[in-house]
Image (cartoon, helix red, strand yellow):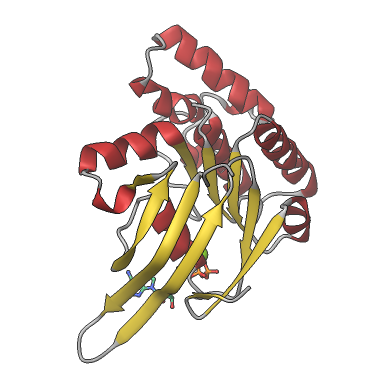
Amino acid sequence: MSEPVLKAVNLNKHYSLGRGHEVWGLKDANLSIEKGSWLAISGPSGSGKSTLLAILAALDRPTSGELFFNGENLSSANDVRLAHYRKKKIGIVFQEYQLFEELSALENVSMPLVVTNLNKKQRQERGMALLESVGLADRAPHQPRQLSGGERQRVALARALVHDPEIIFADEPTSNIDKKAADSVMKLFHSFNKRGNTLVIVSHSQELAEAAERQLYMDAGRIVS
Ligand SMILES: Nc1ncnc2c1ncn2[C@@H]1O[C@H](COP(=O)(O)OP(=O)(O)OP(=O)(O)O)[C@@H](O)[C@H]1O
Ligand SMILES: [Mg+2]
């Protein structure tokens, strides 16, 4: 049997806000994600979806539990290893996009390529190709504040895909865009997945849930099904 690309064992995330105010962002999460699979995560607001995604993407450390990437225990990995995982192995689309405000759309998209051995011209070409694939070639020089919400979302998606990562983590990637833009995002996800890559997507979208081969439902910090 092939090794899962990601494996989470008893992940917990506990927030202590003082004065006895305690929140479990995540409780006893166990999860095994096969390479090349497509996982959809849904659940009510506050149920822990973004928390789980942040821990799987090694943006946040769990309070307890372990995370394995291709068999490597990331929970005990040092910061250099974690940065390598984040920069080279995965792509992330945040709920709030997190684009660099002072950079153009093209510069934002090409940014992850700085750590590769591509030269500037190659990075720009690759960035343009990705912008084109999300229908934003003509917005390349725009800064994020000169873009609509849905356009920013698509720039963030192009950026997450530009270095051809093994796994994409996306938090509500189609929440702000119209049908036509959502269709082009779906196409991108399908071709990414067809190349054998893995998708982990938080969404309430029926279409995204149906495209996934596996659905996970969260409630009050727990994976309930
Ligand atoms: N830094 C923090 N400190 C304290 N509590 C937090 C923190 N971040 C998140 N929480 C709490 O953890 C719980 C899970 O939050 P999370 O953002 O994962 O929810 P979500 O399922 O992504 O919700 P939404 O659908 O609204 O995005 C929430 O109850 C939230 O209030
Ligand atoms: Mg969230």
Q: Nearer the viewer, residue 133 or 137?
A: 133
Q: Nearer the viewer, residue 208 or 166?
A: 166
Q: In the figure, 45 relative to 65: above or below?
A: below
Q: Relative to 208, is 223 on the left or the right?
A: left
Q: Residue at x 74, y 49 (%)?
A: 178
**Residue 63, position as x, y percentages in the image:** 28, 68
**Residue 193, position as x, y percentages in the image:** 67, 37
Q: Residue at x 43, y 74 (%)?
A: 28
Q: Relative to 17, is 160 on the left or the right?
A: right
**Residue 73, position as x, y percentages in the image:** 33, 48
Figure label count: 0
Q: Relative to 181, is 2 on the left or the right?
A: left
Quadrant containing the C terminus is: bottom right
Q: Residue at x 73, y 58 (%)?
A: 209
Quadrant containing the N terminus is: top right
Do we see residue 102 in this rendering? no
Q: In the figure, 155 relative to 219: above or below?
A: above
Q: Nearer the viewer, residue 35 or 96?
A: 35
